[in-house]
Image (cartoon, rainbow, N blue to C red):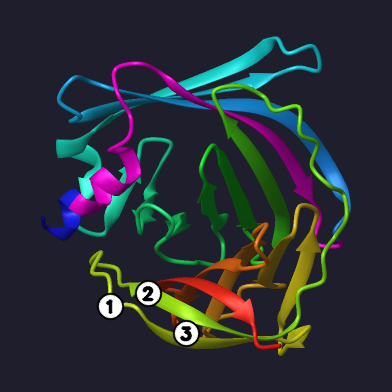
Amino acid sequence: MNNLDRNWNNLFGEYTTDETAWHGQWNSYSPEQELIKSKQAVRSFRSNIDQTAITHTNRYLDADGNVIDEKSWQIDRDTWNQPSGLSHPAISSMRTLSFGAGGGSAWLSHKLILGNACGLELFFRNHEWRMSVAIVYGENGQLDRITHIREHRGCFSDELLSEERSEISGNWIGKKRSMTPDLSISPEEDVRVSFDRTIDDRQIICLPGNTIVQVSKSINANQPIQLAAGHRTADHQLQHLAAHYDNTGTFIELISATLQPTS
């Protein structure tokens, strides 16, 4: 299977002609980690019979669970499945890349450009749960907001999200794979990651639900940037995704790793 078909199948291979709906709680935080907006939404996907087209629908709900806004997109494989990743009709300049089961996915700007709003969303999957973190920069290049999304397949879950912010620091080891802009995935290899609180302009932000985000406060010209998120699982492993951009703001690599502390 070529890279193009594999990426499509990793993203949509599980969907059928029956609608699959992800029911989520969306919490947006300021760069100072203050909760600025909270809402519920349902993201659903339905395939045609030969899995060559996907209907993606977002429904946004009010406090009583009523739909107050709905947006829908048709994603045809021949049109939107690109050699650099899946292009989405909502924002055609962004691309979606997927490692498949257990490896996570990313919807990201292929270029971070001052004067344009840009960023990414990093996705983690655990059976009937899906968690993602969206990192958004404003036109001025400053970090605008971070949105933490926790979704349950099929229905809203009665399981409440813990508000406790788990500190994740120190040295971690594990296995990683990397994906380049042409969707090539490297063989698995050993990796060691250090979670220092601040490295240059980059900082680590702890969110509820055992989630961390690694961000830069701003996008600076002529400086490489890494945007990353991690989700700590019930068995104390850390699922970690990191998007790397070069000093021109061009996307060069997505890394997926499963980590555990060294002690």
Q: Please state the horizontal and vertical placement of residue 116, each as a whole percent of the image.
A: 54, 57
Separation (CA) of disc 3 from disc 1:
26 Å
Q: Please state the horizontal and vertical placement of residue 196, each as a whole percent of the image.
A: 74, 87
Could you tell whether 22 is left or right of 205 in the image? left
From this viewpoint, is residue 252 visible? Answer: no
Name the N-terminal-most of marks 3 and 1: 1
Between label 3 and label 1, give the one nearer the viewer.
1
Front-most of residues 83 and 126: 126
- Tell me the SS state at disc 1: loop
Residue that label 3 marks: 247
Label 3 CA crowd tier, 10 Å (few <14, some 14–19, many 20+): few
Separation (CA) of disc 1 from disc 2:
6 Å
Residue that label 2 marks: 177
Label 2 amino acid? Arg
Q: Which mark is residue 187?
A: 1
Q: Is residue 234 above or below residue 193?
A: above
Label 2 CA crowd tier, 10 Å (few <14, some 14–19, many 20+): some
Magenta region, residue range: 6-32
Which residue is painted at 66% across and 41% down in the image? Answer: 150
